[in-house]
Amino acid sequence: MSMNNQGRPTQPDMAEGTVKTFTGNRALMLEEPLIFEIGAAEETGVDFEDVPETESRLGGLERNQPIGLVGLSEPETVRHYTRLSRMNYAIDLGLFPLGSCTMKHNPRLNERVARMKGFADIHPLQPVDSVQGALEVIHDLGEWLCKLTGMPAVAMSPKAGAHGELCGILAIRSALEARGDAREVILVPESAHGTNPATAAFAGYRVEDIPATPEGRVDLAALEERLGSDVAGVMITNPNTCGLFEPDMKRISDAVHAAGGLVYCDGANFNAIVGRVRPGDLGIDAMHINLHKTFSTPHGGGGPGSGPVVFSEALAPYAPLPFVEKQGDHYVLIEEETAEDHHASSFGRMVAFHGQMGMFTRALAYMMSHGADGLKQVAEDAVLNANYLLRSLEDVLDAPFGASGPCMHEALFSDKGFAEGFTTLDLAKALIDEGYHPMTMYFPLVVHGAMLVEPTETESKDALDQFIGALRSVVERAKAGDETMHGAPVHAPRRRLDETAAARKPILVWQEPEQAEAAE
Amino acid sequence: MARYFTEEHEWIDVDGDHATIGITDYAQEQLGDIVFVEVPESGAMLEKGGEAAVVESVKAASDVYAPVSGEVTEGNDALVDEPALVNSSPEEEGWFFRMTLSDADELEGLMDAKAYKAFVDSL
Amino acid sequence: MRYLPLEPSDRQAMLAKIGAPDIDALFADVPEEARLDGPIRDLPNHASEMAVDAAFRKMARKNSAAADMPFFLGCGAYRHHVAASVDHLIQRGEFLTAYTPYQPEIAQGTLQMLFEFQTQVARLFGTDVANASMYDGSTACWEAIVMARRITKRGRAILSSGLHPHYVSVAKTMARFTRDQIVHSAPELVAQGDTDSLLDQIDDDTSCVVVQYPDILGRIADMSALADKAHAHKALLIAVVTEPVALGALTPPGEMGADIVVGEGQSIGVGLNFGGPYVGLFGCNQKYVRQMPGRLCGETVDAEGKRGYVLTLSTREQHIRREKATSNICTNSGLCALAFSIHMTLLGEAGLRKLAAINHAKAVRAANRLAEIPGVEVVNDAFFNEFTVTLPERARRIVRTLADQRILAGVSLNRMYPDEEALAHGLVVAVTETTNDEDIETLAEALEAALASTREEVPA
């Protein structure tokens, strides 16, 4: 088996001895062709009235070639996507321990409120008098976020966490430019999520690493050493990606401020401290909040997310357009036109329209359901569950920072002690056969063969105990050198997939067989 | 003809003021299955230590730096269609590009085969 | 609390296992001064599902839903019928509550859907490939401009005056930080777009020309000449489609030579949602694939030789390439892409073409009807389902007047271009399959009456 540097088998060996059925199906596990293989151009699952008789005013640009789409009737469509859905793991099926991703239960009340026609069926450019309730939701959610973080201002329009990061860094740059001192460098810890350096670079900054201490924290002394007149700011994740709170956060902020820089906090891990600690009390200037993590909006197989950003007084004037203001009993949308008078220093618009309304309703419904008391309990249970996992597994699994005290909402382990040739990837794939989605693997990069486990607060003790049992079992197998693990998973809809072949000759769209052959 | 090595795991064959550059067997092993290689076009001017080529495996992407300064005379087009050559023959058929040397003194400080082996063993 | 399974007895048992005296001990790393001693005071405590539901119903009632009145708004967001099965299927927990498909063995549902989505988008746009979605049309547009800079190594982007003003704003905001040069001017209320002027501006410093199709005023123009001129100068042509239903009736941008085609997919399956979440579409030529932003799904085989799908070419992305990534995007619009793809599957080739034909026919009827009103002129010669009219007075005032009569008449250009006095009499009217003849008649009569009454108020 060929392996790359992360121990990921990229050209899996062919498995033998599986019982074949005529259909290729395995009872409830059903194979499903592509729509292009079962649909037809003339087939449709939508009935329309007849096309009204009129002249064409398409300016001579009428389409004269087929699009190449296929259709299915409604029953076929429902069956196609239902079958596809059953090949997915999901929170609704079981514990989803992806560290840094906060895969908590997605309440269905949220789905109901987002679909109320007063929110789902309104246009972003309707006169503001006709959308007062929608603006109220945006305003109220912003208020909750400000109070929960102890920050005075919020930008609601960023579309996801990384977009929020960009929003924060652009505000930092705008503030520095306004004082005639744009600076060049953003400092980012090695353990940071890849979006942090990518964001700083996208905003025109050069990125330099901040070293970590052996205990997995930001090295304050090294940071202070590096600070200077060229450093625009730092991007720090707190709690950090090792699952630890940065105890020196306030001192880091003070040091950065003293050197004329500003502090960005990646709020991806806010779930650990929501309702218990306010980032505003730690000297932070900007922080995005992933509504799809802490505030339970669904991940949807990759999105959409929503990444509002809270700001300190220093950055509030630079917040992007548009935003909602309450004036008496009336909600006003501040856009380019109205901004000129009151918000002239805003750095501008990041997105068409006003942000992820469908996520705002869901997140606000979640916050109102929990309330201040419930959100505090969320953080406490999330941290309790993670520490319970940490202490229930550290006798079999190496916990590099386990000795330095409790973790926050996620527990970090390494592959130390696995038999020669056995990797984190083998363990993860074996976990799939046990009915679990694997934890985050090989991240953060600072720990060898890292496994980052985040149970979230919506798991019961019984669910945790079952997971602990499964994990202990696969760890024992990895330590004992159980060769069958290299072939895992065997019970999933697919065995390990050949990622090398996919990347060497990318096939990104379906082609009719004759065309695909011609392209060979 | 002499072969030199860099700490970034590139090899360089020098013949007069002409040189051929690739990545070492150790480097390809670390990267795993190579899926994509981008080589410089002929005529490109390279500076020692500057980015010259890109090599990607499924889960890692690395820059290949110019070990010396000079002008690229040829990129290895075979790698575009068959990046796996870097895995199967890293130090021969899997060469990346050829160039002329603008300053032969820059070769000083590069390792020979023995020194490189000791360097790799120390990692 | 209904979302929290732990019981007090569980918590005690778990603390005992951990060896911590109480929960506060787990927060020991938090400095004393940052710890809160109780729930945040000026926020309410928890509420029942019934109470939260009622609170939202109350807020929802303060909004005028499009379904409840004649509705003619467009300008980048369109009201189309969404089949009931779309909303049912995207709420299946296996789609709704799944993560990004990084573990392909247990995410084939999402991955196969993405592969189908990419194929649908590429075919609709007339491009070789498409990615697995972006946030929305406006951010996809900026990403395309950045991609053109990477490919051409030039920083001068020429934006058509017909490009959605929010998309222009996003590009200008970002360009200020990246030091790209953005060339752009406001549109004019004339039947023809700015193709001739764009042709004049393309030079050897140009990275790309960005045109919207149909444009912000609903106009349609052939972009072949732009493609030729751009390519002659080694620049790229980027086409922006904010109403993908139009491509059921119109020649796709890829066929006219566009190198990158981006768009807003909201029209198909997603709904209005007050502006988000939407779904950014991104297609391009095969040769630029490694410069694309965002996730890509590719076909491969598993260890038993069965066809399967994986996220691929990930080395372009931030989690591998970090500061050298093609974009910082991570989370995209997966579930909206699913809605788009399901709806497109229900429509199929025949359905999309018929939907487009109905949209166009109804828009033509509406344009003809509005043109009968004294003082109202239709600006466009050509259009798809959206056109611009000029009114004898400021459109924004009329829009507000009609909104008070529960008619959402369209988007006033003054809202979109507050600084352009020359556009203040322009109103952009969108007509889709959800509009009926009665709606059009209601709008026409109300508009005529509103214009007549203001004429009486303000003697010439």
Image (spheres, grey):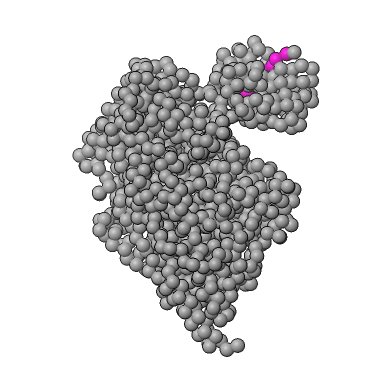
Q: Is residue C190 above or below residue C88?
A: below
Out of B58 and C365, give the one closest to the viewer. Answer: C365
B83 vs C50, left or right, is right
In the rendered structure, does residue A317 fall within the stretch colored magenta? no
Name the quadrant of the N terminus of chain B: top right
* Res A49 seen here: yes
* Res A193 seen here: no
Q: How many marks?
A: 0
Q: Which residues are magenta?
A: B2-8
What residue is shown at x 25% (from left), y 43% (from top)? C5
What residue is shown at x 48% (from left), y 29% (from top)? A499
Residue A462 image point, x, y percent? 23, 35
Q: Quadrant of residue A404?
A: top left
Q: Is residue A137 above or below residue B100?
A: below
Residue A64 image point, x, y percent? 57, 53
Q: Is residue A351 above or below residue A199?
A: below
Residue C331 image point, x, y percent? 46, 44
Residue B41 image point, x, y percent? 71, 31
What residue is shown at x 46% (from left), y 72% (from top)? C440
- Direction left: furthest residue: C9
Name the quadrant of the C terminus of chain B: top right
In the rendered structure, does residue B6 fall within the stretch colored magenta? yes
Out of A232 and C352, give the one closest to the viewer. Answer: C352
A314 vs A468, left or right, is right
Q: Quadrant of residue C169?
A: bottom right
Q: Quadrant of residue C322?
A: top right
Q: Is residue A506 above or below residue C335?
A: above
Out of B120 and C243, give the one closest to the viewer. Answer: C243
